[in-house]
Amino acid sequence: MRQAARDLPAYLICVAAACLALGYVEITAPEAGQRFFGAWPAWAALVGLAPLGAAALVILDRRGGRAGQTRGPVPYFRLLLMGSSFALLPIGLDLVAEPFAPDLHVPWPAAPFYYAGMAVLAETALHLLPLALLALIWPLGPGAWRMRCCLVVATLEAALQVGISQTDPIITIFIATYIVLFNLLQLRIFLRFGFLAMLSMRLGFYVIWHLAWGGLVQLGWLS
């Protein structure tokens, strides 16, 4: 329970803030909140997943998922910048080939609230829960099993993107590979620094890709 004792309060605070943000979106821009869940509000999905996410943190702590974790200060700002840098290649691809529809992005002013909430939801559903399930099968101590588990979990978001992609197959494969690499790095950061560090990378990516490029440039909120 050592790392879980530090991660749990931070995780629950993030969940509470994310629910407030998604609730605000549900009131002010309900069409944005229905993009992935239909009539089921995103905040309600997060409320339902939050106890499982908290349990996943405890499981990972007890089943070796946090073995060898770095102690000391966490470089949150560097992790934000690292996540932001991953948005540059998709932006370049969008400039050259335009594989992404503008309506992929939620418009401002709901966008910051939406993506802040969805970041917590994504980390819970795509990283914490599946990694904890694999840890129940076999402890995640450092070694080949941990690497295989991280690779499996890292493919989940890529598989979702492939499932909804309507672009050229070659571009789709390239994007999926890029997403797997991003997720692998996130999982490494999580195992080394904890949940907030992993979340920081996704928030950094969302700020540049969805808020700046999508909301301000493509959807022209400032025009």
Image (tube, grey):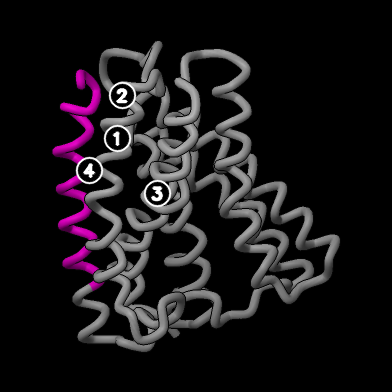
The residue segment tinted magenta is: 1-22
**Are dots 3 and 4 in contact, CB under 8 Å?**
no
Which residue shows up at 37% across the image and 88% down it?
A: 31
Query: Of 215 and 182, which appears nearest the observer?
Result: 182
Query: Of 158 and 215, which appears nearest the observer?
Result: 158
N-term-proximal mark, 3 vs 1: 1
- Determine the image quadrant of residue 77: top left
Query: Which residue is under mark 1?
Result: 57
Mark 2: secondary structure: helix
* Coordinates of residue 167 in the picture (x, y in percent): 76, 73
Q: CA distance from mark 4 to mark 2?
A: 14 Å
**Are dots 1 and 2 in contact, CB under 8 Å?**
yes
Which residue shows up at 33% across the image and 54% down it?
A: 120
- Callout 3 crowding tier (Cα within 10 Å): few <14, some 14–19, many ≥20: some
Query: Is 107 in the magenta?
Result: no
Which residue shows up at 22% across the image and 43% down it?
A: 11
Query: Which residue is under mark 2?
Result: 61
Indicate the amino acid at tag 2: Asp
Indicate the amino acid at tag 4: Tyr
Q: Quadrant of the N terminus?
A: top left
